[in-house]
Image (spheres, helix red, strand yellow):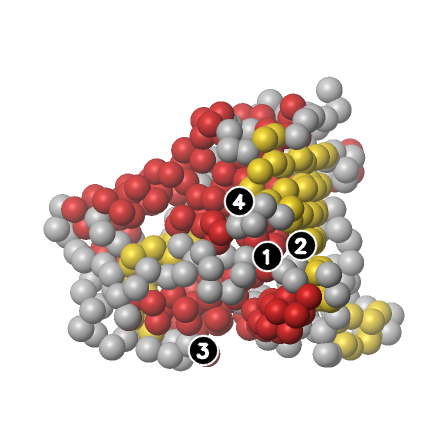
C-alpha cells in the first residue's frame, strides 16, 4: 500500500476491543479511526478511550460496518464482535467491498474464527473472496515470555540435545464478563471453545521448530473431557440467571466450565509429540492464570502469569469495590495479590498488533492467519467430539467438518 500508516476500524466496542486499543500505545504507524458496535454507547466508549490515550485523535463511532469501509481513512478492520455475529460480519465486509463501497488492505479476527468448522471455513472464504490479507488474533503466541522462551529453548536446549516433545498449556479464571459467553448456542460452546483455543495454539507454536511452518507437525489423535463442576450448583445457577435477566439457565442448558485435552502430534521424522491442555471457568484465585510448560530431553521451561515481578498486600481494613485494576478476572480486594503491571504487553496484545500492522503496511499476510484459526477450530471440534463419544478421535476425520457440539445445540447436560 502507498500509505505509511494504517487506519484501523474496530468491529465491537467491548472488553477485548479496549485491550487492543490500550496495546496500540506501543505500536507505531497506526491510528484508531473508528469503532462500530451493537450498541452506540459501547462504540463511543471505545472511541473515547482511543482519543484519551492518544492512539486515535479523530476516532469516532460508526453505525455500520459498511460506513467504516466507506471511510477512506480506514485501511483495515479488527473484528472483535461476539462469536454469534461472525458470519454476518464477514458477509457485510465482503458485500461492501465487492459492491465498490470502499476498499481495505486487510482484516483481523479475534478468536475463535468460527463457532464450528463450517463457520470458520466460511469466514476464511469470505475474506479471500475480496482479496483481503488476514490475521488471526491469537495473542498468547505473541506473549514476550512465550516468544523469548521459545527462542532460548530451541537455540540452546533443542540445538544440543533434541527438540521438545511435551507442551502443557492452561488458561483458568472464574468466568466470562458478558452473559452471552455462557450461552452455548451463542458462543459455540463453553470454556473449551472460549479458552482452549489459546492453549492449543500456544502449545502448537512452542513445539514448532523456528522458521518452519505450523503444519510441519501433524496432529494424529485427540482425547478430551468436559464437565460442569461449579456453575450447575444451585447458588451459581441463580447468579447466572440474575446476571442475564433470566435468559441463562444452567440447570437445563449448561456449558462446560472445565475441559482438558491430550493431542498427539508427529514431527517430520515421525517422532511423537504431546500437547496437554487444561482450561476452566471455575478457577478461584488472584485472577486470570495463564501457564505454559515445555519439556525436552535435557531442559524445561515454565511460565505462570500469576508469578509477576510486582505484588501488593491489603489488610482487611482496606475497603474497595470489586474491580480488575490489578489483574484481569481479579477475585479479591484484600490480602496478598499479584499485579500484572502491563497486561496488554504481558498477554501478547502489543506484539500481536505490531505484527499485524507491520504485515499490512508491507502488503504481507501475517504469520498468524486464518489458516491457523481454521486449524485451531478443527482441533476444538475434535476435542468436543472426543468428549461426547468418550473415545480418542483419530485425525484427520472428515466428520469434524460438519460437527456441531451438543453444548452448542443446547443438548448437553452432564446431570441428566
User: Residue 294's x, y, as percent?
Assistant: 69, 60
Label 2, secondary structure: give it. Answer: loop
Q: Are marks 3 and 4 in contact (CB under 8 Å)?
A: no
Relative to 370, 178 lies left or right: right
Q: Earlier in the sequence, mark 1 or mark 3?
A: 3
* Residue receiving disc 1: 207
Q: Residue furthest right?
A: 316
On screen, residue 264 above or below 61: above
Q: CA distance from mark 3 to mark 2?
A: 37 Å
Label 1, secondary structure: give it. Answer: helix
User: Residue 324's x, y, as percent?
Assistant: 65, 65
Q: CA distance from mark 1 to mark 2?
A: 7 Å
Label 4, secondary structure: give it. Answer: strand
Q: Earlier in the sequence, mark 1 or mark 2?
A: 2
Residue 165, label in figure: 2
Neighbour tally class for label 2: few under 14, some 14-19, many 20 plus, Cα within 10 Å: some
Residue depth check, mark 3 versus mark 4: number of the one nearer the observer: 4
Q: Earlier in the sequence, mark 4 or mark 1?
A: 1
Amino acid at each position: 500500500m502507498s500509505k505509511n500508516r494504517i487506519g484501523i476500524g474496530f468491529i465491537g466496542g467491548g472488553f477485548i476491543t479496549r485491550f487492543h486499543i490500550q496495546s496500540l500505545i506501543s505500536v507505531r504507524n497506526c491510528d484508531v479511526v473508528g469503532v462500530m458496535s451493537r450498541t452506540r454507547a459501547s462504540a463511543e466508549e471505545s472511541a473515547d478511550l482511543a482519543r484519551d490515550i492518544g492512539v486515535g485523535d479523530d476516532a469516532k463511532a460508526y453505525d455500520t460496518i459498511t460506513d467504516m469501509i466507506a471511510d477512506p481513512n480506514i485501511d483495515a478492520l479488527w473484528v472483535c464482535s461476539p462469536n454469534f455475529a461472525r458470519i454476518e460480519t464477514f458477509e457485510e465486509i465482503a458485500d461492501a467491498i465487492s459492491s465498490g463501497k470502499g476498499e481495505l488492505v486487510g482484516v483481523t479476527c479475534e478468536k475463535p474464527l468460527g463457532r464450528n468448522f463450517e463457520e470458520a471455513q466460511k469466514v476464511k472464504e469470505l475474506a479471500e473472496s475480496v482479496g483481503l490479507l488476514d490475521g488471526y488474533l491469537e495473542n498468547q503466541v505473541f506473549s514476550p515470555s512465550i516468544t523469548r522462551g521459545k527462542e532460548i529453548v530451541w537455540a540452546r536446549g533443542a540445538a544440543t540435545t533434541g527438540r521438545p516433545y511435551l507442551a502443557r498449556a492452561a488458561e483458568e479464571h472464574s468466568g466470562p464478563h458478558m452473559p452471552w459467553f455462557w450461552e452455548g448456542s451463542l458462543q459455540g460452546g463453553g470454556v473449551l471453545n472460549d479458552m482452549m483455543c489459546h492453549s492449543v495454539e500456544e502449545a502448537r507454536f512452542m513445539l514448532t521448530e523456528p522458521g518452519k511452518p505450523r503444519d510441519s507437525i501433524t496432529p494424529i489423535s485427540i482425547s478430551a473431557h468436559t464437565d460442569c463442576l461449579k456453575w450447575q450448583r444451585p447458588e451459581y445457577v441463580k447468579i447466572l440467571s440474575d446476571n442475564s435477566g433470566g435468559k441463562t439457565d444452567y440447570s437445563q442448558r449448561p456449558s462446560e466450565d472445565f475441559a482438558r485435552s491430550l493431542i498427539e502430534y508427529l514431527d517430520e521424522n515421525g517422532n511423537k509429540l504431546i500437547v496437554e491442555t487444561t482450561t476452566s471457568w471455575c478457577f478461584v484465585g488472584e485472577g486470570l492464570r495463564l501457564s505454559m510448560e515445555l519439556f525436552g530431553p535435557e531442559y524445561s521451561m515454565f511460565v505462570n502469569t500469576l508469578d509477576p515481578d510486582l505484588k501488593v498486600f491489603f489488610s482487611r481494613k482496606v475497603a474497595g469495590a470489586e474491580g480488575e485494576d490489578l489483574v484481569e478476572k481479579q477475585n479479591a480486594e484484600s490480602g496478598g495479590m499479584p499485579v500484572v503491571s502491563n497486561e496488554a504487553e504481558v498477554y501478547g496484545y502489543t506484539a500481536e498488533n505490531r505484527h499485524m500492522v507491520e504485515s499490512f503496511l508491507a502488503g504481507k499476510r501475517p504469520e498468524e492467519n486464518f489458516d491457523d484459526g481454521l486449524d485451531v477450530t478443527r482441533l476444538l471440534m475434535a476435542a468436543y467430539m472426543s468428549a461426547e463419544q468418550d473415545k480418542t478421535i483419530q485425525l484427520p476425520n472428515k466428520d469434524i467438518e460438519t460437527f456441531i457440539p451438543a453444548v452448542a445445540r443446547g443438548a448437553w447436560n452432564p446431570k441428566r
